[in-house]
């Protein structure tokens, strides 16, 4: 059966990409503002801007493509060392993230109105991000310095041994990458929880079967005892050899059936225990997908505190 994708839309996927990469941009730009020398922070920001540009191009969001492209170019120039990021550049990049979110509403029906409302701000930010740096003015000529009486040459310093080469710095530990995530609708997760709940209930269906098999084993044991009594009773009447052989064969068959039942009961009990544990673990994992990390609640706070500090 093919999966039901009717609840998904390209715009919803674009919004998901934008939310994820906007959080990356906000966190990275704030880190650069605290430590402008941390150039290793720029590369993830370049990838985030590039991903937003690609996602916007898929949904034909031309203004978002233009803003993300300008952000990416400015970050590339900073990464290459051609144009280091200034505080004004960081502020423009943060404002560009805000503009991208404002021009991309949750519902695609509001898209045109949001684009029209943010077009002026977006155009101004794109122009500022693409503006080349002002040419540096030549330094003023230095005032002439009167010639001074030459000092006697200093005495040669005693030769000193060459310093030992500094030990090579240890390689930094590899950065741990965050777990990749995907976005699911609440309806999809709810259906998964329902299916797993059904699986947990289905494992209970196996519980009575080991008991039934044990009852059958007890009945076979009772049948064996009845055959033993029958053999004893027939011995007093002169039991023919043929009848004795038949009774012995029936006893052997009963013993084999009891042994087989014992094996099957053990196997079935083990299978039921494993299935119940697996279904319970699957249920807990699916339920855990409905929980959101606390960091998603607090990740916007550094940006909020920073903006409030600038306005105070």
Image (spheres, rainbow, N blue to C red):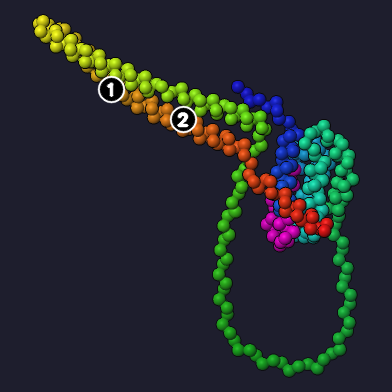
Q: Nearer the viewer, residue 153 or 18?
A: 18
The answer, for residue 262, to whether it is visible in the render is yes
Type of secondary structure dominating the magenta stretch: helix
Region rendered in magenta: 30-52
| Image label count | 2
Q: Residue at left 79%, top 54%?
A: 307
Q: Is residue 167 above or below residue 79?
A: below
> Residue 302, percent across and down?
72, 53
Q: Nearer the viewer, residue 203 or 138?
A: 203
**Are the residues flagged by discs 1 and 2 in contact, CB closer than 8 Å?**
no
For mark 1, does the 10 Å Cα neighbourhood hold few (<14), some (14 to 19), or many (20 or more) residues? Answer: few
- Per the image, the residue denoted by label 1 is 259
> Residue 281, percent across and down?
50, 35
Q: Is residue 69 above or below residue 312?
A: above
Q: Is residue 103 above or below residue 210?
A: below
- Per the image, the residue denoted by label 2 is 276
Q: Quadrant of the C terminus?
A: bottom right
Q: Nearer the viewer, residue 73 or 268?
A: 268
Q: Nearer the viewer, residue 22 or 303?
A: 303
Q: CA distance from mark 1 to mark 2?
A: 26 Å
Q: Secondary structure at mark 2?
A: helix
Residue 38, magenta (yes or no):
yes
> Residue 241, percent across and down?
12, 8
Residue 131, magenta (yes or no):
no
Q: Quadrant of residue 31?
A: bottom right
Q: Residue at left 81%, top 93%?
A: 149
Q: Would you say 213 lies left or right of 291 here? A: left
């Amino acid at each position: 059966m093919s999966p039901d994708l009717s609840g998904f839309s390209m715009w919803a996927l674009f919004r998901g990409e934008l939310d994820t990469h906007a959080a990356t941009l906000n966190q990275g730009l704030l880190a650069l503002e605290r430590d402008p020398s941390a150039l290793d922070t720029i590369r993830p920001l370049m990838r985030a801007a590039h991903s937003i540009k690609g996602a916007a191009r898929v949904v034909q969001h031309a203004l978002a493509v233009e803003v993300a492209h300008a952000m990416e170019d400015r970050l590339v120039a900073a990464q290459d060392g051609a144009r280091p990021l200034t505080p004004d550049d960081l502020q423009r990049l943060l404002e560009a993230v805000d503009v991208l979110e404002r021009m991309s509403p949750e519902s695609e029906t509001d898209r045109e109105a949001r684009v029209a409302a943010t077009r002026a701000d977006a155009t101004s930010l794109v122009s500022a991000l693409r503006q080349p740096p002002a040419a540096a003015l030549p330094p003023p000529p230095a005032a002439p310095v009167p010639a001074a009486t030459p000092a006697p040459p200093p005495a040669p310093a005693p030769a000193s041994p060459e310093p030992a080469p500094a030990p090579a710095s240890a390689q930094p530990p590899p950065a741990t990458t965050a777990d990749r995530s995907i976005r699911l609708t609440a309806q999809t997760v709810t259906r998964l929880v329902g299916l797993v709940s059904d699986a947990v209930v289905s494992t209970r269906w196996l519980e009575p079967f080991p008991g039934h098999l044990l009852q059958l084993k007890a009945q076979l044991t009772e049948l064996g005892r009845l055959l033993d009594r029958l053999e004893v009773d027939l011995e007093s009447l002169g039991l023919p050899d043929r009848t004795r052989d038949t009774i012995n064969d029936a006893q052997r068959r009963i013993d084999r059936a009891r042994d087989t039942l014992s094996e099957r009961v053990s196997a079935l009990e083990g299978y039921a225990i494993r299935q119940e544990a697996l279904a319970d673990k699957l249920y807990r994992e699916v339920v855990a997908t409905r929980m959101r990390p606390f960091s998603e609640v607090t990740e916007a706070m550094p940006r909020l505190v920073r903006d409030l500090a600038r306005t105070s």
